[in-house]
Every structure is written in structure tokens, then in C-alpha cells.
Image (tube, rainbow, N blue to C red):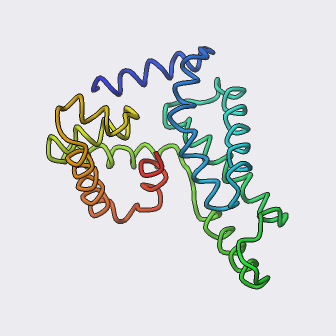
Amino acid sequence: MNSNTSFESNKFESFKKGDEAAFTYFYDKYFRRITSFNVQFIYDQQEAENLTQEAFINLWQNRENIESINGIQSFLYTYAKSKCLNIIRHNKVKDKFKNDLLNHTERELNIEVLNSIQFDTLELTELERIINESINDLPPKTREVFIKKRFENKKNAEIAEEMQVSLKAVEAHMTKALKILRTKLSDYLFLIFILIYNN
């Protein structure tokens, strides 16, 4: 078990016990991802954020039923998916197109996409394993930049200062990392987009 995994495992155990600081850690980690997921289907940033807040409230209320770290994101995405479907089916989504037929077609497509997504905890665990293996295969400097950016939530300027490289170098490493991962994980692009690109 690496240090990052051990750290998150401890946070998860504290979260299960009702530690609000641990809850805040997962809130900060997943809030933007869940909101980005919602926006893709309901086209309203404020409504998407409200829905995400609601998902986290329900997560906190059901924390004792979450069995693993990946169960957190599985719970959040499944809740968000259900709410997005409900909003779409009740035609509460803001019209994206002026043409009613296009709006109807878009809604039907979004319902089909949402119905096809299953945020199964075991599948997410397997997907995370594949992602981690792919990240570990990145060139050392590129991997270090990617981890600092995506998992430690550091800004490019912070990374540049820590690694004593230029901002352009940091950006180049991130571009390289995403290009490599996008190629290696092409069979999982939609879920990869949700799990790491929306961070």
C-alpha cells in the first residue's frame, strides 16, 4: 500500500466515524467532478452545484453504509445520475436549443447515456487499478507533475516552484500525461473523463 492509499484509507475510516474534517477532504476532492458531471446533462451551473450539495448531504447521512473508499464516488455519482434523470424526465432542464425537436432529441440522448452508466463499486475499483497502473508507467517527471496536479490539487505555479521548473514545463508534462493516458485508456474514456479529467 503506497503512502497516498494509506492516507486515504485513514481518511475514509475517520469519515465513517463521523469526522467532519475527513468529510471535508472527500468533499473537496469530489465536488468539482460531481458538479461537472451534472452540468453535462442539466446545463445549469447553479442547479448542478445544488444537486452536488444534496448528494454530499445524503452521503454524510449514509456514511455508515459506505463499505470502501470507492463506495464514496459510487454513491455520489449514482445519486447524481438519479437526480439528473429525474430533472430531464420532468423537462426541467433549461433548453439548450431553440428548436423543440433538437431539445427533445438531446433529452432522449442524455437519458440513454445516463441509463447506460453503472457506477458499480467493484468496477470503479478495477478502473482505478488500471488508472493507477497507467499513471505509474508515465515518465518519472511527467508522473510527478500529474500526481501533484490531479491528486494533490496543486496549481501549476506551486508545482513549478516545488520542482524548480518553468510553468511551460509543467504544462508540457500535463499535456504529455493526458495524451498518454487518453491513448492507453481509450476503452474507458467516458469514465476516465469523470474520474480524473474533471478534477
81 left or right of 117 in image: right
Q: Quadrant of residue 176?
A: bottom left
Of 103 and 19, the residue lying toward us = 103
From what the image shows, is residue 166 above or below residue 93? above
Residue at the spot x=34%, y=44% of the render?
129
* Residue occupying the far right of the picture: 90
Q: Residue at x 74, y 52 (%)?
A: 83
119 sits left or right of 1 in the view: right
Q: Measured from the top left, where is residue 85 in percent x and y?
A: 73, 59
Which x, y percent locates residue 118?
57, 55
Q: Residue at x 57, y 31 (%)?
A: 27
Q: Quadrant of the N terminus?
A: top left
Tell me residue 72's x, y (percent): 56, 35
2 up-or-down from 134: above or below: above
Viewer-proximal residue, 45 or 193?
Answer: 45
Residue 92 against residue 70 in the figure, above or below: below
Relative placement, left or right, of 69 versus 183 is: right
Total marks in image: 0
**Position of 78 compared to 99: left or right?**
left
x, y percentage for residue 130?
32, 49
At 50% from the left edge and 23% from the top edge, which residue is drawn?
12
